[in-house]
Image: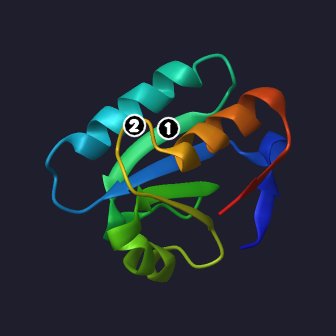
Amino acid sequence: MAGIDSKDIRKIIVACDAGMGSSVMLATQLRKQLRDTGVTVEHTPVNSIPADADVVLCHAGLAARAQAAAPGKLLVPFQIFLGDPAVTRLVDAIKKGGTVDA
């Protein structure tokens, strides 16, 4: 998927694999940052991404698996769990409006 208008984002999935807790921290941080936007943030295993997801966030090492599990969904890979520029761009676009690209 090339991009999505931020006003069309209703559900973000933070997909994980190892269950080490870092992705749970990211999901919690996103919920706080997006609290007043109407966007839901959920945390799921990479192989169980729900069909109603609008955007899938996952570590770059899981991107191929996430894309296979959720074809047609906007995938935003990141390198670091807290403070990654890709995540910051997503949050900013949702809050300020605009298009979100991978």
| Residue 23: assigned label | none
Given this view, does label 2 or label 1 mark the residue nearer the observer? 2
Give residue 101's quadrant in the image.
Answer: bottom right
Query: Which residue lies at the image location 18% right of the left edge and 41% below the top edge?
Result: 21
Q: Is residue 69 above or below residue 58?
A: below
Image point 35% across, 71% down: which residue? 62
> Looking at the image, is 77 positioned above or below residue 89?
below
Q: Quadrant of residue 46?
A: bottom left
Q: In this view, does 7 lie above or below 18?
A: above
Can you identify the residue that label 2 sits on?
27
Structural crowding at the residue carrying mark 1, measured as other residues with C-alpha within 10 Å and reported as few (<14), some (14–19) or many (≥20) = many
Visual colour scheme = rainbow
Query: Residue 50 at what x, y percent from top left?
Result: 48, 61
Q: Residue at horizontal 76%, vertical 71%? A: 2
| Residue topped by disc 1 | 41
Query: In the structure shown, which secondary structural element does the residue marked by tag 1 occupy?
Result: strand
Q: Residue at x 65, y 63 (%)?
A: 102
Please say if the residues under marks 2 and 1 sit with CB atoms less than 8 Å apart.
Answer: yes
Task: Determine whether, in the image, residue 35 is placed left or right of residue 24.
Answer: right
Separation of marks 2 and 1 at Cα, in angstroms: 6 Å
Residue 17, x across and y down, in percent = 23, 63
Left or right of residue 75, residue 82 in this image? left
Count neighbours of disc 2 (C-alpha within 10 A) and say few if under 14, some if 14 to 19, many if 20 or more: many
Secondary structure at numbered mark 2: helix
Measured from the top left, where is residue 38 in percent x and y?
A: 68, 27
Residue 53 in view (yes/no) = no
**Foreground: 102 or 18?**
102
Identify the amino acid type marked 1: Val
Report the side of 96 relative to 71 (left or right): right
Tell me the kind of residue under disc 2: Ala
First of labels 2, 1 by sequence position: 2
Instruction: Please provide percent x and percent y for residue 29.
Output: 41, 27
